[in-house]
Structure formats: C-alpha cells, structure tokens
Image: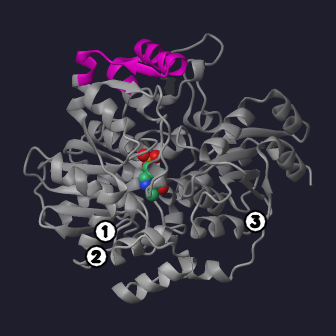
C-alpha cells in the first residue's frame, strides 16, 4: 500500500511513496503528513477469527493488511519486542473497574508508559530499513518526559542509528529524567536544555530545518529523521491495540459480537485516538471516540465547535504534562479524512499564519459523528485518583482525565474502554498528594515507597533500580549550544 500527502503534492516530492519511505522522511509537501492511500479492507470475520490470537498474531495480520514493504522476518523481529512486556501473551491487559467500564493498560512495557506500545516495534523497523538501505540516521527526539525514555530504550545500540534526545532540564519527573540519563548505549546522546518543553520542541524543529546542520551531518554520511508521532511508522502500531480492546471485551463475555463500545482516550498530540479513528473505519464496532483533555483544552474546543484557535493562548503546565499541548499534530490526518487535501491545506495554512482555523458546519458535524470531547483539570484529577484508590485501583493523572468523559459524554448505555497511558510510578508525587489529600512536595523515591506500602502495590524493578543507576549523560546546555553539542557527539 502506498502513502499520500495530507496537503496535496507540490510537484517536487513524489505523489505516492511506500511505507518505508514515509518512515524515513515523514515530512510531506507543504509541511503536510503522510497517510495511507486507503484503509485496508479486512475479511468479514476478522474480529471473530482473532478471538484466540496472541497480540503478536493480531498485530501481524493488521500490518499484513496494510501491505507494508517490510520483510516478514523484520516484522516478526519487531513484534517479538512485545515479549519484553510484563505478560508477553497480553502486553496491554483490559481490566474491569466498573460494571460498564474497563481500563486498557498501555504501560506494561520497559519504560512504563503508552509510548512503548508503538516505539518498541517502530525502533526495530526503522533500524532494519536503514540497514537494508545501507544508510545511517540521526534520530532527533524532543520530550516532555515519556517519549524520550521510550525512544532511547528502543534505539539503544541499534545498528545505523544514533539518537539525540532533548529534554527540559528540571521539567520532567525524577523517574523520567533517570530513565534518560542512565540509559546505556554508545549511540545515545541525551541533552538537558535550560528551558521548557516548548524550547526543546522548537530546537528540534530548527535542527530539522537547518541546512548547515544537515550539511555537517552529511560529511559523516548521516541523514536526519525524527521519532515523533507525525511519523506514520508509529501510528500504524497504534491501530492494533484498539482491535485488542474489542476482542478482550468479547473474550470476557462483556459484549456480543457487533455490539458497539465507547473508547475514551486521554489526548495530546492525537496519535493514540487517531489509531482508534482508523480502527473504527476499518470495521471495529466503536460507537464514538471520547477525547479527554486537561486545562489545555484546545482539542475539546475544536471538537465541540469546529474552531481551533490558539490566539492569545499560553501553554499551562499541569499534572498531566503529556497532554499539555497547543498545536496537536495528528488532528491533520483526521481533517484530511473528512475534508480532503485542498481543504486540509487551507485550514493548516490558516493555523500557521493566523493561529486559528474554522471548519464549516458540515465539516464540524462530520467530525462530531466520530468524536466527542471534554476537559478536566488537576483538582478533579486528584479527587478521581483518591476515589479509585479507595476501590483498590491506582491510576496516574493522565488516566484520571478519562473519568470525566465517562461521567459526561456517554449518550448510550454501552460498555466503555478507557486508556491508561502511564503507570502510577511515573507520576508518583501527584498520586501521593491525591492519596494524602495534601500538596507536599515529595521526591519520586519517597512517593513511590509510600504508595507501595499504603496501597500494597509493587514498584517494578525497572523503576526502583533507577535510583541506584549510574548517570551516564550529564550534559545540560543553553539552547544556542545544542547544535554544536550534537555535532561534537556525532564526530566523536
Ligand atoms: C503521549 C501521552 C499521552 C498523549 O497521547 P497522544 O497520542 O499524544 O494524544 C497521554 N498520556 C501519556 C502518559 C502519554 O505519554
């Protein structure tokens, strides 16, 4: 299957490219993104036929349906990485917490957050393509805390790949920082930035666009790519687990075949819920996708009004930092599906030039056929964490935003799956504040130990070991010095 461009073609780039090409250079004409030319048609009984499949078998058959240009052996090697999750046969369990509410736990991978679900296999595939083409790549990653550890973990010691990971120094949790600065791999360059996540992201975009930087890399025969979720190589792995949600409810005898369900997704860059949108369009019986936002309510505003307006808006720092966003990249792929390339270009140009766009009534209604949205806030989040801890379920602050959608957005009495995007261990100080109903500043280590005792839950070894690990990456630099720091690393 080939990939086409969300903003149409500029006459310079190819009109259609393969999956592997879309992975290596994810930026399309006019600053657009790549999307599959059409979604694959699955056999009529696809879901029933996979009732007893392992996650890897399900994943394999969905990837096969996309006819991606990756060798079978490489696909299997990538999917084998799910063996490193807590339970290889069920890497993302779906757990009942209310009569009609189930939590799909996406955090059972090596870095304890959603990002592993896609980045683990993606890293393997990307490295295999680079090797096959005999090309070397520098992968840039900017992180607010979860993408960085997951990208470093998947790319460490991979052939033909080097990674430069930029994180805001002082802007992540202790656990997230340690996951990055202690990660061992000769091909990894981890750089703290004196600034916030926006600064890290801006630095990444500037590097991707910098000719002098690319020329410098070229001298060493290195090409440049990025590991953020504009890359369809990540999105494709985010379609699979929405099929898994449905199959798990069938297996648990909670629904009968064909019965519709709701999905609730705590959203930022819209990659997770975009996977659900594609799953719905590939035939999974999903009534609607319910989007949860935090105080940065741009997605809620867009879905409820059709207008995306960031004029005068400032990013607010919340206790669910992975959802702190103003410009959400993957909405573009939904807009393309609904409105086509010409209109997508018009709307995205408007967003870039005037910091807003407005969809018409017809377009907005189409959007609302698929999505509903609601915003939450920190105060509500800690109450929810407390409430569910009393029922013996510990959730992180991102996951807690889903409950707001569960309480307000369901129009029908249908079974609902909400997504838990991070383990409580990644945001333990907030969780402990919720449990104790206070605002004390806790170190992660103290918070982890207290919660573990209080709630009788185990801290995974990969987290507790961090506090005894050696720090291997000490660099913290000014924004102006990032480029030279990376060049220095490349040529060393
Ligand atoms: C990345 C992330 C999200 C947001 O997912 P998107 O695909 O960007 O919408 C939510 N919660 C956590 C914990 C994350 O790491």
> Label 3 belongs to which residue?
185
Residue 468: quadrant of the picture? bottom right
Instruction: Check mark 3 vs ligand 1: CB closer than 8 Å? yes or no.
Output: no
Residue 310, placed above or below residue 286: above
Residue stretch rendered in magenta on the structure: 335-364
Q: Judge by depth and name the residue closer to the eye, 415 or 250.
A: 415
Within-10-Å neighbours for mark 1: few <14, some 14–19, many 20+: many
> In this orientation, does residue 373 appear?
yes
Secondary structure under badge 1? helix
Left or right side of 463 for 62? left
Question: Vertical placement of 146 versus 295: above or below?
Answer: below
- Nearer the viewer's eye, disc 3 or disc 1? 1
Instruction: From the image, tell me which residue sits under label 1.
Output: 385
Q: How far apart are marks 3 and 2 (CA)?
A: 38 Å
The number of discs equals 3
Task: Residue 23: name its quadrant.
Answer: top right
Q: Does the magenta stretch include residue 345?
A: yes
Judged from the image, the secondary structure of the residue bearing numbered disc 2 is helix
> Which quarter of the picture shows residue 134?
top right
Residue pictured at 49% horizontal, 34% vertical: 327
Circle number at residue 389: 2
148 is higher (above) or lower (below) than 338: below
Q: What residue is shown at x 58% (from left), y 48% (from top)?
A: 71
């Amino acid at each position: 299957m080939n990939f086409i461009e969300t903003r149409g073609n500029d006459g310079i780039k190819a009109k259609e490219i393969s999956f592997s090409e879309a992975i290596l250079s994810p930026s399309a004409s006019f600053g657009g993104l790549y999307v599959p030319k059409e979604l694959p048609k699955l056999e009529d009984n696809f879901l029933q036929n996979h009732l007893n499949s392992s996650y890897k078998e399900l994943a394999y058959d969905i990837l096969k349906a996309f006819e991606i240009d990756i060798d079978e052996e490489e696909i299997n090697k990538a999917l084998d990485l799910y063996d490193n999750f807590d339970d290889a046969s069920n890497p993302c369990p779906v757990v009942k917490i209310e009569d009609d509410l189930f939590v799909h736990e996406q955090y059972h991978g090596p870095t304890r957050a959603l990002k592993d679900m896609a980045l683990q296999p993606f890293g393997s595939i990307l490295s295999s393509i680079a090797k096959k083409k005999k090309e070397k790549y520098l992968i840039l990653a900017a992180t607010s805390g979860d993408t960085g550890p997951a990208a470093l973990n998947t790319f460490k010691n991979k052939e033909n790949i080097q990674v430069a990971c930029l994180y805001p120094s002082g802007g992540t949790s202790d656990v997230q920082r340690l996951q990055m600065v202690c990660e061992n791999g000769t091909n990894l360059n981890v750089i703290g930035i004196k600034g916030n996540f926006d600064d890290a992201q801006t630095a990444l975009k500037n590097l991707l666009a910098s000719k002098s930087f690319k020329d410098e890399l070229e001298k060493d025969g290195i090409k440049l790519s990025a590991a953020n979720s504009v890359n369809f190589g990540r999105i494709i792995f985010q379609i699979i687990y929405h099929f898994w949600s449905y199959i798990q409810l069938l297996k648990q005898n909670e629904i009968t075949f064909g019965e519709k369900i709701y999905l609730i997704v705590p959203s930022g860059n819209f990659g997770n819920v975009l996977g659900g949108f594609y799953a719905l369009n590939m035939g999974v019986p999903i009534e609607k996708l319910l989007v949860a936002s935090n105080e940065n309510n741009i997605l809620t505003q867009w879905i409820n009004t059709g207008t995306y307006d960031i004029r005068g808006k400032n990013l607010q720092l919340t206790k669910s930092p992975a959802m702190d966003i103003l410009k959400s990249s993957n909405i573009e792929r939904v807009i393309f599906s609904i409105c086509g390339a010409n209109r997508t270009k018009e709307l995205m140009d408007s967003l870039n030039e005037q910091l807003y766009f407005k969809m018409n009534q017809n377009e907005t209604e189409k959007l609302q056929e698929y999505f509903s949205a609601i915003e939450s806030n920190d105060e509500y989040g800690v109450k929810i964490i407390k409430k569910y801890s009393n029922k013996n379920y510990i959730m992180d602050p991102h996951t807690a935003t889903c409950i707001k959608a569960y309480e307000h957005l369901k129009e029908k009495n249908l079974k609902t799956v909400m997504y838990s995007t991070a383990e409580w261990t990644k945001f333990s100080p907030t969780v402990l504040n919720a449990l104790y109903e206070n605002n004390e500043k806790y170190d992660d280590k103290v918070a982890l130990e207290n919660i573990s005792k209080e709630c009788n839950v185990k801290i995974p070894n990969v987290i507790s070991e961090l506090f005894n690990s050696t720090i291997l990456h000490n660099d913290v630099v000014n924004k102006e010095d990032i480029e030279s720091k990376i060049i220095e690393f490349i040529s060393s």
